[in-house]
């Protein structure tokens, strides 16, 4: 069986060369006589792996010294609670709700304090990013929260919101390392790695040092304090060691590809091929306002549920996997993360053209 083109939204496609390298090292990592999956996270060998991964990520994103990089567990969803527990000093925060994950984070924050929805795109099924240039942010809000790229709905903040001097917290799970980013614009930038960086089970949190304090909400578990993990260099308990090792390999692969500027160019090219076709197609149409389109997640529909289902079925038979839209919205979605080759997108568009001829 040859490899398929995998358009899954996450866990998602990984660079083939990374998978091959990991396979070669599976039984014996660099003469250690064991797999990374088996080795102690306290060993010298593993210490090198995690430190090198952090150094490469810092290099790729140009992360300043006054930001900490934490490799944690619990996925992005655990951060929905961890953020208010650690940052809600005034028990108030502003949330911009642009999709299901931002909505879940907003609901979770309500458990810990007053979460205020300052903008939303729910009125048009989250198909656009609202204007965030002048938001009614409460003066005493501890932070402003966004989900920067909305995996389900295929929207992306092209301009960060004006936070009026408040700390910006961003979930970047599905656009992580897809383009250059100015880390200093954020207080916290975090994401689950299973979309663009590695296997499920790791969440990376990049957090400004002044936000890591003992002053957390009463009752915050030890494991959910950023300080616990920062003080122990992400080794307070056994980390998702193998997942971090794969992330480290992906960081090196991105560097080899030319870094984040090169990644953005490739991603724009790939997305352009698909969006250009959608814009001229008579059968398929994109569901997102043009200026808010994500480079990573491209939702589209035919207008007929039966035809959508037929398309997904035939695409799968043609080696184009996981094109079914999220269960909450239906339709189709092509996730074209960093590791999706240009050929995969070209093959998808070819298939869509054939399908349109037959069914148009």
Image: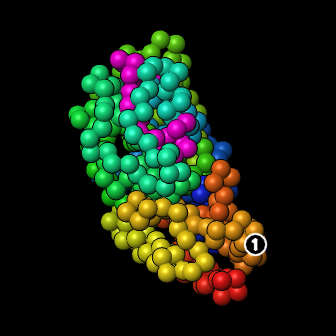
In percent of width and height, residue 229 lies at: 46, 29
Viewer-side residue, 235 vs 172: 172
Report the residue marked by disc 1. 310
Q: Quadrant of residue 117?
A: top left
- Residue shown at 59% from the left, 57% from the top: 9
Mark 1 packing: few (<14 Cα in 10 Å), some, or many (20+)?
A: few
Viewer-side residue, 147 vs 247: 147
Q: Is residue 35 visible?
A: no
Viewer-side residue, 224 vs 111: 111
- Residue shown at 37% from the left, 63% from the top: 291
In percent of width and height, residue 312 lies at: 71, 69
Q: Please state, as top left, top right, bottom left or bottom right, where the N terminus lies in the image.
A: bottom right
For the record, the magenta segment spans 85-104
Q: Quadrant of residue 8?
A: bottom right
In percent of width and height, residue 31 lies at: 58, 56
Q: Is residue 334 left or right of residue 3?
A: left
Which residue ends up furthest to the top in the rendered image?
218
Q: Is residue 99 left or right of residue 37?
A: left
Whether 231 is drawn above or below 287: the answer is: above
Instruction: Label 1, secondary structure: give it.
Output: helix
Q: Quadrant of residue 90?
A: top left
Q: Please state, as top left, top right, bottom left or bottom right, where the C terminus lies in the image.
A: bottom right
């Amino acid at each position: 069986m040859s490899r398929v083109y995998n358009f899954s939204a996450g866990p998602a496609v990984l660079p083939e060369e990374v998978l091959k390298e990991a396979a070669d090292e599976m039984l014996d990592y660099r003469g250690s006589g064991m797999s990374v999956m088996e080795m102690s996270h306290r060993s010298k060998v593993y210490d090198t792996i995690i430190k090198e991964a952090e150094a490469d990520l810092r290099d790729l994103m140009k992360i300043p010294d006054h930001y900490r990089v934490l490799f944690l567990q619990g996925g992005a969803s655990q951060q929905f609670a961890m953020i208010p527990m650690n940052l809600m000093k005034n028990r108030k925060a502003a949330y911009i709700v642009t999709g299901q994950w931002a909505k879940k984070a907003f609901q979770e924050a309500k458990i810990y304090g007053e979460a205020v929805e300052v903008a939303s795109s729910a009125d048009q099924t989250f198909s656009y990013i609202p204007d965030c240039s002048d938001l009614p942010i409460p003066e005493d809000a501890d932070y402003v929260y966004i989900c920067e790229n909305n995996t389900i709905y295929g929207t992306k903040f092209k301009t960060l919101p004006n936070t009026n001097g408040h700390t910006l917290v961003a979930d970047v799970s599905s656009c992580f390392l897809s383009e250059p980013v100015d880390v200093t614009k954020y207080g916290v930038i975090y994401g689950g790695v299973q979309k663009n960086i590695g296997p499920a089970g790791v969440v990376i949190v990049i957090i400004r040092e002044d936000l890591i304090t003992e002053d957390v909400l009463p009752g915050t578990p030890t494991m959910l304090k950023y300080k616990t993990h920062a003080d122990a260099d992400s080794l307070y308990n056994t980390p998702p060691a193998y997942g971090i090792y794969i992330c480290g390999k992906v960081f090196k692969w991105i560097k080899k590809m030319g870094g984040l500027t090169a990644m953005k160019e490739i991603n724009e090219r790939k997305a352009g091929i698909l969006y250009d076709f959608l814009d001229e197609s008579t059968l398929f149409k994109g569901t997102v306002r043009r200026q808010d389109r994500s480079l990573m997640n491209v939702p589209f529909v035919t207008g007929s549920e039966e035809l959508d289902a037929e398309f997904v079925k035939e695409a799968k038979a043609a080696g184009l996997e996981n094109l079914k839209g999220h269960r909450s919205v239906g339709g189709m979605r092509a996730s074209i993360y960093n590791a999706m080759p240009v050929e995969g997108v070209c093959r998808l568009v070819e298939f869509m053209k054939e399908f349109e001829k037959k069914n148009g």
